Image (cartoon, grey):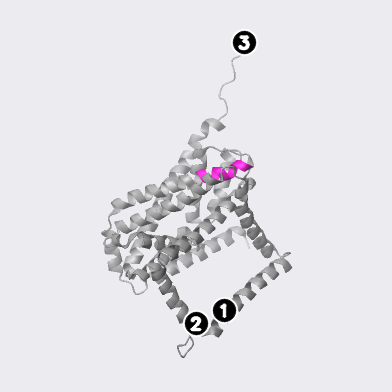
Amino acid sequence: MNKKILNILQYLLFLGVGIFLLRLSLKDANLQEIEEDIASANFIYLIPATLMLLVSHFIRAVRWKILMEPLGYKPSLINTFLAVLIGYWANLAFPRLGEVLKCTILAKYEKVPADKLVGTIVAERAFDVVNLVLMLAVTIGIQYQLLGSYAGEKFRQIFHNKAGAFSYSSVFIVIISIVLGFLLVFYLLNRLAHISFVHKVRQLLKGIWAGLTSVRNIKNKGWFFFHTIMIWVLYLLSTYMGFFAMEGMSGYGIKAAFSALSFGSIGMIVPSPGGIGSFQYAVQQVLLVYDISPEKGLSLGMLIWIAQTGIIIIFGTISFILLPVINKPKNEKPRFHPKQNI
């Protein structure tokens, strides 16, 4: 099948997943209430939220530069920052395209080999996954009584038998199934390594491990981890601002913001364009734990998503225009020949 057609079909599939989850969020919800919630929102709080997101993208560019230094490359910060914004911009249209595009941009304007940058992207994503896991752990840890009881209730629903008693055999079956599943995957990855798809999966897993261990080559590891933490702190604070923007939500505090960020980030992993549908659904569902209505939860998810997406569309477009302008003198050939002796 033509690669272009395959990409279009893939895009439509991911978009369909996002639309499905959005429709699921709207199921049995009062649409008029959602419209009123968003219309009555205090958008002034979105100004600091968007500024925090923009700063987080800048810090991500600084961190990316730190990852490039062991390779012997020191691109300009402005080009790196604009490449990051354009990468996010591209991901709104085609998930994961942005990773390729921002490497291509630096390869063009900073003469950094694109293939050398792939490892730094893998390293970034590996640490993002670790940070998300840590964020989830902190979220559950600081609200164990609330989220723990919620998870416990779901756990009991799964592992109770028809008579209503706890089924130890069900737990045993699940544990054994997970262990056997891991062993089977490990066996297949080694046994079927000659198959193209399996080989790609193996390479991906190796890449993630290489990315996590690449931090050993960074001179200033503390500076790298500081920037990594600051990215997520700014994500959290910008999410918290969203609660203040929505009428009647400011009293839920920073803990609810932790939950919205953690589970919303999981929603963003679903490869729908820009996280549409999946982000709103994840935020809506986790906020039900706080007795927040489905309408309020969805409205908040929409508001935060609008802020995140809006800043990428605006500044990503500006970056596209600005990048060749900034680098024009660097690439322009002399218009006049040097003066000759007369």
- The type of residue carrying mark 3 is Asn
- How many badges with numbers are in the image? 3
- What residue is shown with label 2? 159
339 relative to 163 in the view: left or right:
right
- What residue is shown with label 3? 341
- The type of residue carrying mark 1 is Val
Q: What crowding class fits label 3: few (fewer than 14 Cα within 10 Å), some (14-19), or many (20 or more)?
A: few
- Nearest the viewer among 79 and 125 is 125
- Nearest the viewer among 37 and 124 is 124
Q: What crowding class fits label 2: few (fewer than 14 Cα within 10 Å), some (14-19), or many (20 or more)?
A: some
Q: Which tag, 2 or 1, sits closer to the chain's start?
A: 2
Q: Which of labels 1 and 3 is toward the front?
A: 1
**Residue at image point 52% right, 61% down:** 11
**Residue at image point 52% right, 55% down:** 128
173 relative to 288 in the view: left or right:
right
332 relative to 142 in the view: left or right:
right
Q: Which residues are magenta?
A: 62-70
**Residue at image point 30% right, 57% down:** 244
Q: Quadrant of the N terminus?
A: bottom right
Magenta stretch: helix, strand or loop mostly = helix
- What residue is shown with label 1? 174
Examine the rendering and report whether any part of residue 301 can be seen.
Answer: no
Label 2 with label 1: CB-CB less than 8 Å: yes
